[in-house]
Image (spheres, coloured by chain):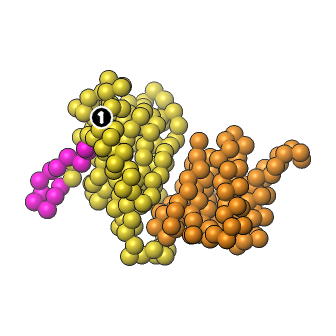
Amino acid sequence: MAETETRPAGTGVKKKFMYVNRKTPYGTIYALEALEVVLISAAFEQDVSVAFLDDGVYQLASGQNTSGIGMKNFSPTYKALGDYEVKKLYVERESLDERGLKPEDLIEIVYEDEDFAEKPLVRIVSRAELTEIMAQQDVLLNF
Amino acid sequence: MKLGVLVSEGPYTHQASDSAYQFTKAALEKGHEIFRVFFYHDGVNNGTRLTVPPQDDRNLQKAWSDLAAKHKLDLVVCIAAAQRRGILDAAEAKRHGKDADNIAPGFRISGLGQLVEAGIVADRLIVFGD
């Protein structure tokens, strides 16, 4: 994504952006193109959150193997989100439960804090908690 | 109010582009400002001038282009999404060695930052998807 951007007109404004992932990683392009927006948005110094719910929880499933479908396995990119200063990742507990998934079935995403200690980025939240977090956002983008 | 609009689906298969167009037109008629309309995912397919819908059907690309001309709208097609789907302007066609371009009048190709910027600058970002 070698894109040149002009300085945004809203420089200095900090809003709460949430990217809501609801679909499987493959089958449609929404998950991949959502991740591209998240990575770009990191350059704009906004308060960025990423939510995974419904089938979107599969985007973080560990052990993805796309060799049989001729598509790129882009799941390793999620591990880089911390390096992009995207540090608020929410996974909805009910969506995991409904699909027979457990938190340990998800890829491990960590970031290094100032003490070089690795801290997990993913927070498992209930549907009710996620509803409240969504209500606090300025901009919600659904994918 | 200053509004941003995101169109996430292509024309005809989904109603998203129709709804976004009707919304944008109505908002302008009510005196609101449209900061930008951004086309992402298959939404970039709204920006090809080569569509030829039946004469008794609406022509969405022309509708957007006409609205842009009338109101000086900023219609932005995401470059990454556009390249995947074969939407090119003259400069991109030349850069990638393609023999033609197809961007429609009033549309321009730019980066995803333009979407984020719309979210920052606009009072509301309205998303039209599936």
Please name the residue shown 42% across and 30% down the image: A67
Q: Indicate left or right for B6 with B50 as reference.
A: left
Residue numbers of the magenta segment:
A112-123
Residue name at image x 61 percent, y 53 percent: B7
Pointer 1 local density, CA inside 10 Å: few below 14, some 14–19, many at least 20: many
> Is A124 or B44 nearer to us in this picture?
A124
Q: Nearer the viewer, residue A1 or A30?
A: A30
Chain A is which colour? Answer: yellow
Please say if B17 is above or below A14: above
Residue A122 located within the stretch drawn in magenta: yes
Image x and y of residue B44, in percent: 63, 53
Q: Which chain gets the orange colouring?
A: B
Q: Residue at x 59, y 50 (%)?
A: B128
- Percent position (x, y) of residue B85? 63, 48
Q: Residue at x 25, y 44 (%)?
A: A123
Element on which disc 1 rests: helix
Q: Amino acid at mark 1?
A: Arg
